[in-house]
């Protein structure tokens, strides 16, 4: 029996354009902390090793600091061996980070790069069958190639791969798709015993055997990930497998649609934002639709500005937002405008209802309202 941790898609060095100032630094630190938590979990749970199934780094051009901090994080648990598989973000091409002077000079003894498809004895009686990416666009099923010619053996074999499965990909013409049925057939006859995959950032069990898994990213990276922030702890022997999903991530990407038609809807949005836990690790994107008065839009703007300071990031989903700002009579009366200014307000109100200039007109109405309020 062997027990190990299956993880993938660390993508250390990843940046996000919507993270400003210190939020990006905290995002970077959290990803390194996840590596340390993986090592600590492996040590405390009695795992023999960790397999990292591709995309350890965001690219082969990450900075020196990213590399040395990653190696230092893995070195924190010297009793745990980390097996790193090059993936599509960090392939083993001529520019590979894994052969850079920074990596080779500072690599601790417990970090092993899986550089070929030759089986590797992880511990006595357990072989890793790796399928490293040698370029960003392979033209074959690398996992099938790595398994080619294998015969049943006494050793427990763990396939370590990266990429999309043909059963889950809409791109049927991609020559690098991993063939699921071939893997299932090899599992059934005992040629291989577990398939650890990376590339899909959501933790996912695939197929009928209970032995084909995507670990998912240990920290969330985008809004469309269904179940990130995990690793898979696998107990495996020739007769059975016991995968256990362990949540280790801290960061969250949250997207919500909100219809806003009045004060009560703004209050509901405020309650939801205020109820978010660990705001400094939450990235929120809102699609706002509906119609508000000038006073209500000003209140909404204040609410969003306040929570933008509390959250790691707060975005408006422009492509899916359609929020009309139309002054009502109380807005006009409250502003106390007359003459040309009142006529301009009426023109802006008409433009804000629809048309190519609607967004600009709404922004102008909001500015006009704020300026008039500031003069009170």
Image (cartoon, rainbow, N blue to C red):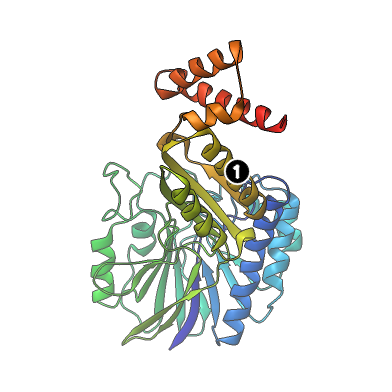
- 252 sits left or right of 72 in the view: left
Q: Is residue 316 above or below residue 364?
A: below
Q: Tell me which residue sits at (48%, 28%) in the image.
A: 329
Q: Which residue is mark 1?
A: 18
Q: Nearer the viewer, residue 312 or 325?
A: 325
Q: Residues within 10 Å of mark 1 (few under 14, many from 20)?
A: few
- 109 sits left or right of 57 in the view: right
Residue 265 shows in the view: yes
Q: Tell me which residue sits at (63%, 53%) in the image.
A: 312
Residue 327 shows in the view: no
Q: Nearer the viewer, residue 154 or 357?
A: 357
| The N terminus - image quarter | bottom left
State which quadrant residue 38 falls in: bottom right
Q: Is residue 317 above or below residue 356?
A: below
Q: Nearer the viewer, residue 142 or 201?
A: 201
Q: Tell me which residue sits at (62%, 55%) in the image.
A: 12
Can you give x and y, in whole percent of width and height, for residue 236 in the image? 40, 83
State which quadrant residue 248 falls in: bottom right
Can you give x and y, in whole percent of width and height, for residue 104 in the image? 71, 59
Q: How many marks?
A: 1
- 303 sits left or right of 260 in the view: right
Can you give x and y, in whole percent of width and height, for residue 116 in the image? 50, 59
Q: Is residue 64 above or below residue 241?
A: above
Can you give x and y, in whole percent of width and height, for residue 228 in the image? 47, 63
| The C terminus - image quarter | top right
Q: Nearer the viewer, residue 346 or 260?
A: 346
Tag 1 secondary structure:
loop
- 303 sits left or right of 228 in the view: right
Q: Tell me which residue sits at (75%, 62%) in the image.
A: 106
């Amino acid at each position: 029996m062997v027990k190990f941790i299956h993880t993938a898609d660390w993508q250390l060095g990843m940046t996000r354009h919507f993270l400003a100032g210190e939020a990006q630094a905290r995002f970077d630190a959290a990803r390194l902390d996840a590596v340390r938590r993986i090592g600590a979990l492996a040590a405390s749970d009695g795992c023999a090793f960790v397999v990292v199934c591709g995309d350890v780094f965001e690219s082969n051009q990450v900075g020196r600091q990213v590399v040395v901090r990653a190696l230092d994080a893995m070195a924190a648990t010297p009793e745990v061996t980390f097996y790193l598989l090059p993936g599509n973000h960090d392939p083993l091409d001529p520019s590979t980070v894994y052969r850079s002077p920074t990596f080779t000079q500072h690599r601790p003894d417990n970090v092993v790069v899986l550089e070929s498809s030759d089986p590797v004895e992880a511990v006595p009686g357990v072989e890793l069958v790796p399928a490293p990416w040698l370029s960003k666009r392979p033209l074959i099923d690398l996992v099938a190639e790595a398994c080619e010619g294998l015969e049943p053996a006494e050793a427990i074999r763990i396939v370590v791969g990266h990429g999309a499965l043909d059963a889950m990909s809409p791109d049927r013409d991609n020559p690098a798709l991993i063939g699921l049925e071939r893997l299932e057939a090899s599992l059934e006859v005992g040629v291989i015993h577990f398939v650890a995959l990376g590339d899909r950032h959501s933790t996912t069990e695939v197929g009928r055997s209970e032995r084909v898994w995507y670990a998912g990213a240990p920290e969330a990276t985008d809004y469309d990930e269904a179940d990130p922030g995990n690793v898979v702890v696998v107990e495996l022997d020739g007769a059975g497998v016991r995968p256990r999903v362990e949540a280790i991530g801290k960061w969250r990407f949250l997207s919500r649609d909100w219809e806003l038609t009045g004060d009560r809807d703004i209050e509901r949005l405020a309650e939801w934002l205020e109820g978010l836990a660990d705001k400094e690790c939450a990235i929120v994107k809102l699609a706002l639709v509906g119609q508000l008065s000038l006073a209500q839009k000003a209140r909404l703007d204040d609410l969003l500005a306040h929570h933008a300071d509390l959250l790691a990031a707060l975005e408006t989903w422009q492509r899916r937002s359609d929020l009309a700002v139309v002054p009502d009579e109380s807005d006009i009366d409250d502003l106390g405008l007359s003459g040309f200014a009142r006529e301009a307000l009426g023109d802006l109100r008409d433009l804000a209802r629809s048309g190519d200039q609607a967004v600009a007109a709404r922004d102008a109405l909001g500015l006009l309202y704020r300026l008039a309020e500031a003069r009170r």
